[in-house]
Amino acid sequence: MRAQLARILASEIFSRSDRLTAFLTYIVEQTLDGHGAALKEHVLAMEVYGKAADFDTGLDPIVRVDARRLRDKLREYYGSAPHDPVVIAVPKGSYAPLFQMNGTVVAPALEAPRTTLPRAWTVGAAIIVTTALAGVAVGRWRARPEFPAPRLLTVTSFPGGEGMPSFSPDGNFVVFTRRGPDPNETNDLWVKAVDGDALRRLTDTPQLHEAMPAWSPDGRQIAFYTTEGGTSSGVFLVSSLGGPVRKVTSGGIDPAWTPDGQSLVIATNREGEDRGIFVQRLERGTRRQLTRPPIGFLDSYPKVSPDGKTLAFGRSSGLKKNALFVMPMSGGEPVRLTDDVGVGRFDWTPDGREILYPQVDTSGLRVFRIVASPGQRATAVPDIPIGVNMLSVSPMRTGQTFRVALGWGQSDVGLRLVDLDAVTPAGVFALATPFCDATRIDMPGRLSRDGRHVAFASDRNGEPQIWVADRDGSGLRSVSGLADGFENAGSWSPDGRFVAVSGALHGNTDIFVVSVDGGLSRRLTEDPAIDSDPEWSGDGRWIYYTSNASGRSEIWKVLATGGTPVRLTTGGGFEPRESSDGRVIYYVDAAARNGLGVAAALKQVSSAGGPETVVFNGVPPGAWDVTDRGIVFVSGAAGVAGSSGSPDTLDLFSFADRRIQRLGQLPFSVARYGVPRVLTVSRDGRWALAAHIDRWDRDILVVDNFR
């Protein structure tokens, strides 16, 4: 049996996967040593993956998913080596392997010597071999006798992240985005066979992110869009065989094909231009606008039904939580299908009757399906792993089933608390410790005025919520009070009793005040606009914030007790921060676009309004803060999206001499995607809270024989 294990691990199929090699080795050796009964999910999580004792298997299904992958790889291996003397199989519902030798099943002692085999393995050697090689049936799905059972296939398991899959017209290949293990690398496009190892790279652009590839109906081209410095560079086409790319249009995101292959449907959401979804004719270059979102809302993820008559799309507020809408391609009013559910890339079923989509619920990202007409109720698809954020549906295949490609993974962005006074002789910050660490996404909020408490945003309970804790991590508690979720934690009130936050209520993003002792939130703004990044004034009287109520993002203020908002800027602005004396509001002229590639100008305006002037250039939005001494920011980040992942440095623009000086080097690189804000600093300049990507691995899975 150990010789057979060595054969399997030496094969090309397993030599490419360190994780599955470790998984299989551990369960085989433990079973041969008589410890098979102890092979439980939690034990494997700790022993194979190094998880802590308090690891929650309900939140992170890595063991279950890798078990499915292992069964898939064993099937693939024995398909290429049918005459091996020993068959090692991992039956569904167990992590203890079973062995077949010369037609006889051998089950090493799992608890005590057995006189009978487990029920599923008592029907003879032929059934056992068939079970071992047939693949994995997905959970509790029960196909009718005339239909094959669904099974979960692992298409990619490369180091790093793969996502945004799109099927070829025959359902045999997927195009997807891929980056390496360095979380700061950019995405390129790749194509891989679903049922084999055929793999082809389509793009190689270190300075550009390729995103949202979409395969043309004739299979010849792939549409995608690119970003550079967090801003869309345009929509492009590339042959499915690779080669030069052709630009379709500047700007635009989320391209999707019409079924006739003559046009692309593209979303446009940039400041200063018409927003909505457009139909772009490829031959003539003309475009027609289909949707016009209200002020404060964005439209994205367009997808045309298989018959070409209906458009489905997501509409979101600033929280990026989409609701599903449908409307006729010929024009008309959109009809809402769902509440704000955090939809990622979705797709129509081949018959055009339903839509499959990822949805955020209390357990994470799950896949739901809904009939594409008003008044219908969505239902969860059982046993697809939690953590799917993008999906694609193939055309109907033989047997009236189809395939669903999934971008799957459990992302982990953690916080690091850095002591800015502790610098080594080499200029490196010596104390940078994890802060209230979790296995989900945490986003820096703000430190209280005295630097003793921290507010931050986290989805560790399944939904975005605001959390507060003491600076040493004690006293952690949620202070959320909204059903739709909070986007970010703004600043503390001067007395430390309240936190100003931005969040969504019934699809509208506004400014709220929450008590750190819990209870209901208090709403300050109600305009149909995206209001975010609140900043409490030092005297406690005003709350400054960003709003696009005028049609573009500007700096506004409103009384902390409520009242009529007042606009401060007219030339555009984001992320207001008050000076220590309360006289000046600092801000940047570009938005944090989920990446540090933007080089913004840092500007100032009087807190009473007036002229807007530039302080200095080169500040990355989302990676700066104001202290008593000056402005601290991540240096060298702007303009280098796709950095090699080397540690970042912090610089200080001094108010005293108006010069920039080096504070020190961080012992890590800050997150360049996953959260819009990556740095916050205490008012006295002693402490910094920075976001770091702990894990962002994603794989492409395919559900075969789906109905």
Image (spheres, rainbow, N blue to C red):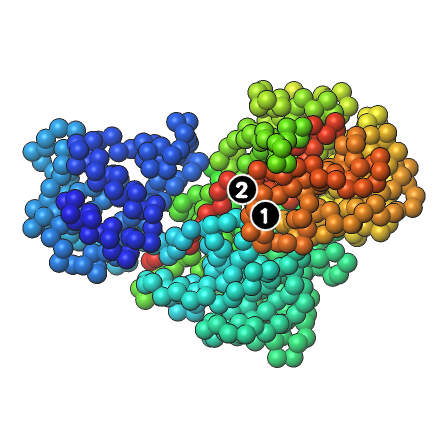
Name the quadrant containing residue 340.
Answer: top right
Q: How many marks?
A: 2
Please state if 246 lies on the left or on the right of 47 as rendered.
right
Please state if 218 lies on the left or on the right of 130 as rendered.
right
For the residue marked with disc 2, what is the amino acid?
Ile
Front-lying residue, 410 or 373 = 410
- In three-dimensional space, the C-alpha distance between marks 2 and 1, rounded to whole angstroms, equals 8 Å
Q: Residue at x 77, y 42 (%)?
A: 660
- In percent of width and height, residue 205 lies at 56, 63
Name the quadrant containing residue 652.
Answer: top right
Of the 4 image quadrants, the one containing the N terminus is top left
Residue 677 visible in the picture: no
For marks 2 and 1, the one nearer the N-term is 1
Residue with the mark numbered 2: 693
Residue at the outermost right position: 610
Please state if 609 lies on the left or on the right of 457 as rendered.
right
Residue with the mark numbered 1: 673
| Mark 2 closeness class: few <14, some 14–19, many ≥20 residues within 10 Å | many
- The answer to whether the residue labelled 2 contacts the one labelled 1, judged by CB atoms less than 8 Å apart, is yes
Residue at the outermost front position: 425
Residue at the outermost bottom position: 283
Front-lying residue, 433 or 169 = 433
- In percent of width and height, residue 61 lies at 39, 40
Q: Residue at x 37, y 57 (%)?
A: 155
Q: Secondary structure at mark 2?
A: strand
